Image (cartoon, rainbow, N blue to C red):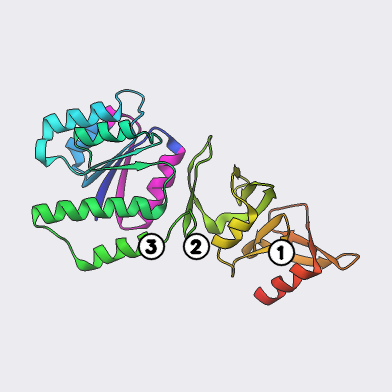
Amino acid sequence: MKTILLIEDNSLLAENIKALLEEEIFSVIHVSSAEEGLNIVFQDKPDLILCDIMLPDKDGYELLQILKDKLGYSLPPFVYLTAKSQRDDQRKGMELGADDFITKPFTKSELLNAINTQLNKREKLTGNEGSAESKTQILNQADDDLGGDNKLSYNGFIFLNEKKSPGFFAVKKIIYIKSLKDYTTIVFNDFRKVVIRRTLAKWEEILPAENFVRIHRQTIINLQFLDRVERDKNYTYRVYLKLIDIPFKMSQRYSRKIKKLK
């Protein structure tokens, strides 16, 4: 099992990345400062380093320079993980010897492909290419994209660049999504709410249709959380969801969809 050192001071984002990678075939060590990262590199000898640029003590550039001076060619693959997207920042990182530069927000496939690429490069250089089975597993997992215009997997994750708590969110934990014109509110089963700029029509395109259904022009629900549907007056229905006290309205047109999927 490959070990990844994650140096990231945003604890929620780090927890999400750690959980995501541990669901794959990786062991993840998380620290929140450059000094802690230095200690782990020499103590545990990770196979790859994921490092944010903006850290509370030293920045990612200074950390990489220290590691290069001390380890030289034995430095493991070093990948920056940062919100910075300007070309100058990327050039500076590459000139210092960074192997890759992943800009937030990113998808699961982007993260796993970057890791897989750098590990494969290093294995070829050292002559230790590992088993074909382990490589296939990483590549297959990377096919499950988290966002953009690609179809989401029900058991996959989506990266949401929410200001207070950016990170990976499990698709299956979405209870419902409600439209706010060009924006939508996503409500999760821990009652966390995230507002992002994405239309309900776009959500319909990327969510798995067998799990998520539109019950109103403003609402998509996760059928896993459907409790019951009750007939209301004037050919309308009330939809009750688990964990949610207030029912949603649904027209007869959308009720046929639910009956077909159930």
Q: Earlier in the sequence, mark 2 or mark 3?
A: 3
User: Going 24% across and 68% down the picture, which residue do you hit?
Assistant: 133
Between 86 and 214, which is closer to the camera in this rendering? 86
Q: Nearer the viewer, mark 2 or mark 1?
A: 2
Q: Secondary structure at mark 2?
A: loop
The span from disc 2 to disc 1 (Cα, nearest Å) is 26 Å
Residue 158, position as x, y percentages in the image: 49, 52
Quarter of the picture holding the N terminus: bottom left
Q: Can the viewer see residue 212?
A: yes
**Residue at position x 31%, y 54% in the image:** 113
Q: How far apart in space, not on screen, are marks 2 and 3 (Cα)?
A: 10 Å
**Residue behind mark 2:** 151
The residue that mark 3 highlights is: 143
Q: Residues within 10 Å of mark 3 (few under 14, many from 20)?
A: some
Residue 262 seen from this side: no
Residue placed furthest toward the right: 233
Asked if 143 appears above or below 147 in the picture, the reply is below
Please give the range of residues in magenta.
Answer: 12-36
Q: Are marks 2 and 1 in contact (CB under 8 Å)?
A: no
The residue that mark 1 highlights is 227
Indicate the position of residue 76 as horizontal and vertical percent values. 18, 43
Q: Is residue 174 magenta?
A: no
Q: Which quadrant does the C terminus fall into?
A: bottom right
| Residue 99 sits above or below residue 177 on the image | above
x 36%, y 28%: residue: 54
Residue 145: image location, x then y, percent:
43, 58
- Residue placed at 87% from the left, 68% from the top? 235
What kind of element bears circle 1? Answer: strand
Name the side, left or right, on which 249 lies relative to 84. Answer: right
Q: Which mark is residue 152?
A: none
Apparent side of residue 252 relative to residue 193 in the rendered image (left or right): right
Amino acid residing under circle 3: Asp
